[in-house]
Image (cartoon, grey):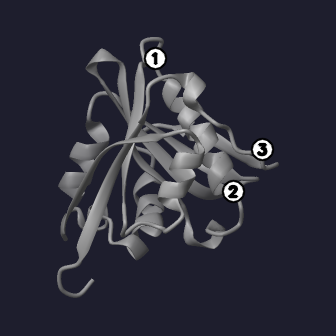
Amino acid sequence: MLGRVEETVTHVEMTSPDDLCPAAPVPGVTLENVPADSPLIRPTTLRIGERYHWPSTTWSEAEWAEYLARPGRACVLIRYATEVAGLADFQCYALGSVEITTFGVVPEYVGKGIGGYALTLAVTEAWNLAPTVRRVWLHTSTLDHPHALPNYQRRGFRTFRTTTGER
């Protein structure tokens, strides 16, 4: 990315599993729980985030190690049949809050109609990470895929904060 660009970050949340508006199932799309130190996490994140200039695409080995080793980290691969189609990872916090810290599909699956259902599965996973989950949240940006925020809204997420700045 050349120069600085304006970015609007939108933070969205659900406060009940009943808020989820599931997308229609897509045959062959599943989640696979993997340990945070899986060798597939970093390259899949890079494949998803490079085109959107996610900060994680420039992290050092040490930054990745610290991120993946945080207590409360959980990761799932989004599979389409046997192929890795995307990734979601989660950070569990005290008092029942779960942040979806990464969600996305790899470039060859963008626009193939799996994102809504993959998000449905990921949100369901977030709600099931612990019996005490009371809130699932995430943030997206105007620099992300243009369908990201509408997908989150269609699944039932509500905006709780918006900020604008330069990146």
- In this rendering, does residue 32 appear at all? no
How packed mark 1 is, by other alpha carbons closer than 10 Å (few <14, some 14-19, many 20 or more), is few
Amino acid under label 3? Pro
In screen coordinates, is 81 left or right of 159?
Answer: right
Amino acid under label 2? Ile
Give the mark nearest the N terminus, 3 or 2.
3
Give the mark nearest the N terminus, 1 or 2.
2
Q: Which residue is mark 1?
A: 130
Q: Which residue is mark 3?
A: 25
Q: What is the C-alpha distance between the residues marked 3 and 2? A: 9 Å
Measuring 49% from the left and 68% from the top, which residue is drawn there?
146
Amino acid under label 1? Ala
Q: Position of residue 7 (x, y in %)?
A: 27, 68
* SS assignment at label 2: loop
* SS assignment at label 1: loop
Residue that protrudes farthest toward the right in the picture: 27
* SS assignment at label 3: loop
Q: What is the C-alpha distance between the residues marked 1 and 3? A: 24 Å
- In front of the other: label 1 or label 3? 3
Measuring 41% from the left and 19% from the top, which residue is drawn there?
134
Viewer-proximal residue among 47 and 23: 23
Q: What is the C-alpha distance between the residues marked 1 and 2? A: 26 Å
Image position of 24 with respect to 33: above or below: below
Q: Position of residue 52 (x, y in %)?
A: 39, 71
Measuring 71% from the left and 61% from the top, which residue is drawn there?
113
Image position of 140 with respect to 127: above or below: below
Give the mark nearest the N terminus, 1 or 3.
3
Q: Which residue is mark 2?
A: 114
